[in-house]
Image (cartoon, rainbow, N blue to C red):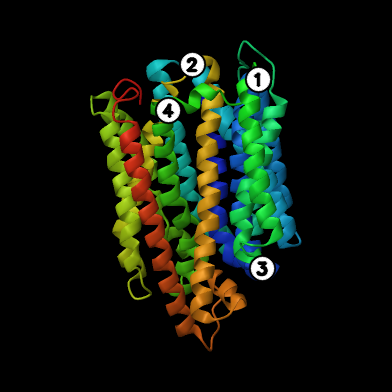
């Protein structure tokens, strides 16, 4: 019962991210929202996911992995239900933050449950299946949500998510319980880490709308740094830290963790913003835009298990993950040629490359990283990995959205029009000019993402060159 329940939870969490991206234009029109407020529908989810994943993983080790998983499934389902009946974009943003916290627990506690339930080869296969199911969720999310939006409106997708969350909650109550030998929770560290990460991520998320010199942005950034420093001091003195300082000095573990971060950076901006561009530039309906995203997401269905099989047959995992990172990097750089005249044709090869690289990373990075940590810290390690993923995803959404708004504002001369165009709301009178501005802004943003992926790839190459298992643990 354990494996099916955990994998279903992973699918649901992934569907919630990718499916919501397709719904953004429809949500913006119905809720009269655009710009930062609309971006928070996705960014808020990822902010909560990033802030709570490490805490959820550490808590699962201490108070019980099954108990944490069940509680997280309840929170996730409640967030979905509130989103489905939300009367305003601010209400929707708040509900999505709740869902993100639940999703964090699903991923962290679910990974910890699998790590504690299986050993060696079986554990490798379980983690590979976890990566594959994340790919399934990402792949079917846009298509399923697009179909539901076309048939019943965007609220229908969240009704389906609520029903699935309820079923997962019921199934999780039958899983075997496990916990670390020490059952004490580092509440001070948990609170400090959550506050620090929220403050540090609030600044770049809100700076595009408030301005980088706005008092709230500056205070949030400074306070976040202070809270992070205090968190580090507390962790060094804590007998049961929420984040073991030794993890951060393990070059191999950090290298594999950064590999996860790199693929997230190169993947999520496309997942969130490309459907809007396709609907605006290529005049695709939500269902068609969701179907087009299969070019990006379908490779994730097959490549995780294929990557594991290659590693188990002797292919060095280091070489395989570096190949994956190169594919993600080149795919992003290739998208600078995207235009309304070749939207789908020009995007096909880059999207397939990025999806293949992302799926390959899904299949091997977690297993490689877990092999470098002691068994009693697997929940913490899984939490750290997913914190990096969530933080990268939230920051990419913020950076992508901010770049689009900034470039559009410089071309259109109006912040209000820039916000509307970035949400796919082009005017009939100035459509051609606005579409040209959107395309140019898209290209410049993609160039920045591609260069960042290149820098991160070089860093990963240096860190994992002589550290960590390469063949034994996929």
Query: How far apart are the two marked residues, 2 and 4, measured between alpha carbons?
Result: 12 Å
Q: Badge 2, how many Cα within 10 Å: few under 14, some, many 20+?
A: few
Query: How far apart are the two marked residues, 3 and 4, measured between alpha carbons?
Result: 41 Å
Q: Badge 4, how many Cα within 10 Å: few under 14, some, many 20+?
A: many
**Label whose residue precedes the other's in the sequence (1 or 3):** 3
**Label whose residue precedes the other's in the sequence (3 or 2):** 3
Percent position (x, y) of residue 204?
Answer: 58, 55
Query: How far apart are the two marked residues, 3 and 2, measured between alpha carbons?
Result: 47 Å
Q: Quadrant of the C terminus?
A: top left
Nearest to viewer (mark 3 / mark 2): 2
Nearest to viewer (mark 2 / mark 1): 1
Percent position (x, y) of residue 135?
Answer: 44, 42
Q: Are marks 2 and 1 in contact (CB under 8 Å)?
A: no
Which mark is on residue 33? 3
* Farthest top residue in view: 181
Query: How far apart are the two marked residues, 2 and 1, measured between alpha carbons?
Result: 18 Å
**Label whose residue precedes the other's in the sequence (2 or 1):** 1
User: In this rendering, would 395 be left or right of 294?
Assistant: right
């Amino acid at each position: 019962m354990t494996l099916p329940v955990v994998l279903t939870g992973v699918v649901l969490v992934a569907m919630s991210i990718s499916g919501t991206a397709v719904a953004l234009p429809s949500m913006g029109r119905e809720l009269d929202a655009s710009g930062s407020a609309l971006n928070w529908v996705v960014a808020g989810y990822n902010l909560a996911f990033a802030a709570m994943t490490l805490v959820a993983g550490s808590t699962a080790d201490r108070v019980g992995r099954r108990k944490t998983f069940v509680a997280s499934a309840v929170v996730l389902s409640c967030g979905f239900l509130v989103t489905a009946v939300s009367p305003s974009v601010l209400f929707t943003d708040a509900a999505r933050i709740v869902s993100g916290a639940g999703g964090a627990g699903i991923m962290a506690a679910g990974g910890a449950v699998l790590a504690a339930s299986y050993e060696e080869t079986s554990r490798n296969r379980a983690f590979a299946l976890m990566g594959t199911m994340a790919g399934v969720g990402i792949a079917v999310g846009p298509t399923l949500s697009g179909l539901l939006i076309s048939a019943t409106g965007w609220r229908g997708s969240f009704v389906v998510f609520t029903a699935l969350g309820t079923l997962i909650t019921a199934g999780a109550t039958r899983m075997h319980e496990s916990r670390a030998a020490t059952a004490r929770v580092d509440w001070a560290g948990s609170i400090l880490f959550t506050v620090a990460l929220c403050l540090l991520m609030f600044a770049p998320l809100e700076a595009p709308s408030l301005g980088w010199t706005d008092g709230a942005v500056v205070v949030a950034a400074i306070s976040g740094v202070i809270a992070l420093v205090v968190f580090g001091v507390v962790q060094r003195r804590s007998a049961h830290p929420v984040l073991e300082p030794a993890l951060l000095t393990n070059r191999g573990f950090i290298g594999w963790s950064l590999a996860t971060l790199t693929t997230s950076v190169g993947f999520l901006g496309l997942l969130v913003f490309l459907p809007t561009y396709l609907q605006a530039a290529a005049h695709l309906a939500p269902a068609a835009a969701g179907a087009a995203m299969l070019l990006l997401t379908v490779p994730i269905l097959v490549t995780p298990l294929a990557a594991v099989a290659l590693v188990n047959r002797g292919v060095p995992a280091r070489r395989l993950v570096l190949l994956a990172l190169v594919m993600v990097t080149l795919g992003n750089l290739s998208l600078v040629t995207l235009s309304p005249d070749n939207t789908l044709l020009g995007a096909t090869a880059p999207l397939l490359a990025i999806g293949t690289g992302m799926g390959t990373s899904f299949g091997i990075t977690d297993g490689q990283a877990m092999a470098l940590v002691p068994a009693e810290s697997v929940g913490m390690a899984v939490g750290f990995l997913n914190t990096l993923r969530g933080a990268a995803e939230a920051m990419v959404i913020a950076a992508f959205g901010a770049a689009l708004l900034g470039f559009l504002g410089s071309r259109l001369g109006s912040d209000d029009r820039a916000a509307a165009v970035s949400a796919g709301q082009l005017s009939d009178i100035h459509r051609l000019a606005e579409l040209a501005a959107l395309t140019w802004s898209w290209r410049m943003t993609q160039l920045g993402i591609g260069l960042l992926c290149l820098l991160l790839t070089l860093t990963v190459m240096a860190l994992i060159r002589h550290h960590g298992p390469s063949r034994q643990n996929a």
